[in-house]
């Protein structure tokens, strides 16, 4: 009984982040969906689980093709890719606009449907005719605080089977760049991507607000304030007035179900991959949602593809040492989220923060870690030795006796 209790067996809300191995994660998610299909007895717990599963299922059936992502990108800003009538988000600047800016300035307005709102992916032609062929091939982790250009470039580079995205970003930012890349990706096999900014219904969450205001003067307040303004113009984003019901937790919330989706998709889509689009400033590793996703997919043995701006090994002599030291001393306790409630929710579901941090180090530095190829030369640095020790102990712990 104690074990069931500790594992969250009796919690009305399923913990979204359990440090579980692949088989148990997969079986749990699968059996939940299968149970749901023939669920007949009504009741509070069961219907809550059933709503939870339906949300996971509908999230997992959304995705967009890389062509659709490029077409969207081509419409941003007053550039030459789009005709004036089609242009959205006139303030868009590829070298300054973040994903948060694009969600607020383009995705939310474009996904409004009368009084309601949809996920952007559900507004695309054919989105409603979901079949097994429209399941995502790849789940993408990225941070909303980084350049949207880096996210798009990483996805396009992945579709083009490149191993870094810097040159793609340069090309995308040029006038007409998106059109040329569109021709190139059309010659490759079609890949579908699950990207939270496009696949979560933002109207069922953040569209009409920015979360509660933190204490003025705090770091958190500056981040909160930055998040409600367009990085380029400095203007406050307009709030959406749709009447779509909002859910920030619970069975109908779409923002906390990455691990459930991962489990379900691993079952339905055997070739599923996890693309980690690492922004040029490595901010992804300090964002609570991203870190939770990285550790979950690592422990689920989902094949991870990491794309960096450049595969040039980090330079121990240059400013990279600072980046390196930040990564080597990362702890989930210091990770940030735009909503403090989200951060606390993520932390509350990590049973052992120390163990989680050790896993995080293995995710980044371990022998199958994300940055294993980018860190040549750092073995002479004390921090590296420390990280290697932590990664080794994590590997030993994860492999068991
Ligand atoms: Zn809305």
Image: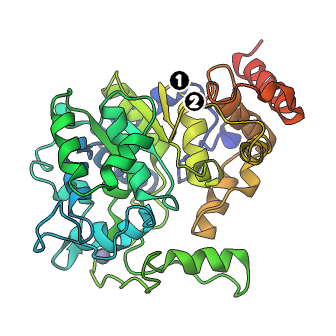
- Say left or right for 158 vs 110: right
Circles 2 and 1 in contact, beta carbons < 8 Å: yes
Q: In this orientation, which residue lies closer to the viewer: 149 or 4?
A: 149
Identity of the residue drawn at 37% across and 28% down: 272
Disc ID at residue 301: 1
Image vertical order of residue 336 relative to residue 129, above or below: below
Residue 274 at least partly seen: yes
Identity of the residue drawn at 29% across and 37% down: 136
- Residue 374 percent across, percent down from the top left: 63, 30
Image vertical order of residue 198 relative to residue 296, above or below: below
Disc ID at residue 276: none
Quarter residue 373 falls in: top right
Image vertical order of residue 368 relative to residue 359, above or below: above
Q: Which residue is mark 2?
A: 298
Q: Distance from label 2 to label 1 (Cα)?
A: 5 Å
Q: How is the image coloured?
A: rainbow
Identity of the residue drawn at 63% across and 47% down: 285
- Residue 332 percent across, percent down from the top left: 72, 50
């Amino acid at each position: 009984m104690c074990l069931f209790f500790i594992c969250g067996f009796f919690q009305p809300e399923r913990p979204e982040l359990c440090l579980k191995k692949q088989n148990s994660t997969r079986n749990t998610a699968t059996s939940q969906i299968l149970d749901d299909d023939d669920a007949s007895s009504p009741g509070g717990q069961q219907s809550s689980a059933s709503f939870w599963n339906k949300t996971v299922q509908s999230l997992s059936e959304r995705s967009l093709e890389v062509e659709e992502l490029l077409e969207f990108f081509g419409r941003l800003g007053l550039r030459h890719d789009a005709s004036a009538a089609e242009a959205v988000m006139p303030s868009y600047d590829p070298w300054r606009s973040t994903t948060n800016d694009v969600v607020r300035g383009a995705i939310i307005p474009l996904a409004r449907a009368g009084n309601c709102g949809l996920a952007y992916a559900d507004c695309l032609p054919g989105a409603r005719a979901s079949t097994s062929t429209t399941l995502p091939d790849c789940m993408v982790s990225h941070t909303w605080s980084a350049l949207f250009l880096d996210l798009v470039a990483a996805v396009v580079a992945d579709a083009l089977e490149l191993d870094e995205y810097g040159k793609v970003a340069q090309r995308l930012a040029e006038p007409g760049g998106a059109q040329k890349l569109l021709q190139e990706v059309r010659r490759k096999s079609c890949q579908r991507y699950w990207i939270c900014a496009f696949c979560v219904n933002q109207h069922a969450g953040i569209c009409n607000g920015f979360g509660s205001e933190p204490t003025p003067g705090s770091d958190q307040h500056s981040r909160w304030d930055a998040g409600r303004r367009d990085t380029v113009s400095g203007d406050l984003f307009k709030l959406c007035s749709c009447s779509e019901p909002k859910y920030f937790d619970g069975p109908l919330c779409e923002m906390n179900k990455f691990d459930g989706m991962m489990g379900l998709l691993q079952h339905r889509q055997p070739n599923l991959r996890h693309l980690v689009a690492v922004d040029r400033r490595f901010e992804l590793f300090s964002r609570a949602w991203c870190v939770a996703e990285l550790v979950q997919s690592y422990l689920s043995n989902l094949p991870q593809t990491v794309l960096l701006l450049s595969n040039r090994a980090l330079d121990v002599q240059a400013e990279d040492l600072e980046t390196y030291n930040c990564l080597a001393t990362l702890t989930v306790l210091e990770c940030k989220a735009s909503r403090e409630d989200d951060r606390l929710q993520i932390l509350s579901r990590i049973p052992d923060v120390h163990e989680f941090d050790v896993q995080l180090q293995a995710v980044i530095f371990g022998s199958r870690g994300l940055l294993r190829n980018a860190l040549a030369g750092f073995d002479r640095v004390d921090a590296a030795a420390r990280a290697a020790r932590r990664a080794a102990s994590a590997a030993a712990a994860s492999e068991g006796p």
